[in-house]
Image (cartoon, rainbow, N blue to C red):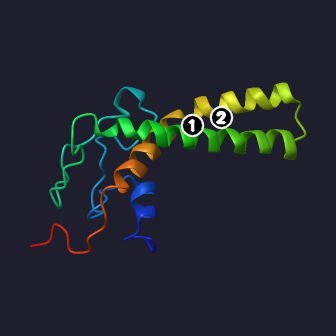
């Protein structure tokens, strides 16, 4: 992929922020809700420890709030402006959007959070 080596690639794909060779998550599908937060402890390719301190991913809640607002605003604009829905229908569109995209928002927020602390290293994990 053309974006490999960028933070955007790691955020979108959920791969290791250092080597971008392995998924951080044990389950690729975020809609398997009982496993949405299950992550490998370390990258098997470069050895990066994902949870660098206890409760590390609590900070992702702040990112999740911002992503939730972005999704809600997008749902409102699409429903109210483009589809000419009433305010009540737009409200339900927002609620529905947040429910449907909750697992994606949770994963994206973790991906963004960890990428604030790690950077891509081209030769990470290679002997």
**Residue 58 placement, left or right of 124:** right
As drawn, the label of residue 59 is none
Few, some or many residues within 10 Å of mark 2 (<14, 14–19, 20+): some
**Residue 30 placement, left or right of 19:** right
Q: Residue at x 46, y 55 (%)?
A: 12
Circle 1 SS class: loop
Task: Compare residues 117 and 123 and report the one nearer the observer.
Answer: 117
Q: Quadrant of residue 45?
A: bottom left
- Would you place residue 3 above or below residue 33 in this image? below
As drawn, the label of residue 101 is 1
Q: Which residue is mark 2?
A: 97
- Would you place residue 126 above or below residue 90 in this image? below
Q: Quadrant of residue 99?
A: top right
- Would you place residue 73 above or below residue 10 in this image? above
- Would you place residue 4 above or below residue 24 in this image? below
Q: Position of residue 5 (x, y in %)?
A: 36, 71
Q: Residue at x 71, y 42 (%)?
A: 73
Few, some or many residues within 10 Å of mark 1 (<14, 14–19, 20+): some
**Residue 63 placement, left or right of 81:** left
Asked whether the beta carbons under mark 2 and mark 1 sit within 8 Å of each other, the answer is yes
Q: Residue at x 29, y 35 (%)?
A: 38
Circle 2 SS class: helix
Spatial CA span between label 2 and label 1: 6 Å
Q: Position of residue 72 (x, y in %)?
A: 67, 38
Q: Which quarter shows the N terminus? A: bottom left
Q: Which quarter shows the C terminus? A: bottom left
Total marks placed: 2
Q: Position of residue 36 (x, y in %)?
A: 38, 34
Residue farthest toward the left in the current orientation of the protein = 127
């Amino acid at each position: 992929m053309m974006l490999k080596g960028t933070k955007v690639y790691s955020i979108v794909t959920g791969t290791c922020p250092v080597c971008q060779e392995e998924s951080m998550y044990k389950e690729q599908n975020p809609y398997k809700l009982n496993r949405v937060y299950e992550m490998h402890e370390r990258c098997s390719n470069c050895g990066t420890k994902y949870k660098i301190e206890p409760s590390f991913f609590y900070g992702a809640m702040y990112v999740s709030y911002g992503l939730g607002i972005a999704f809600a605003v997008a749902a409102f604009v699409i429903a109210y402006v483009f589809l000419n829905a009433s305010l009540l229908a737009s409200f339900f569109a927002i609620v529905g959007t947040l429910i449907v995209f909750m697992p994606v928002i949770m994963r994206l927020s973790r991906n963004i959070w960890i990428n604030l602390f790690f950077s891509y290293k081209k030769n990470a994990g290679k002997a």
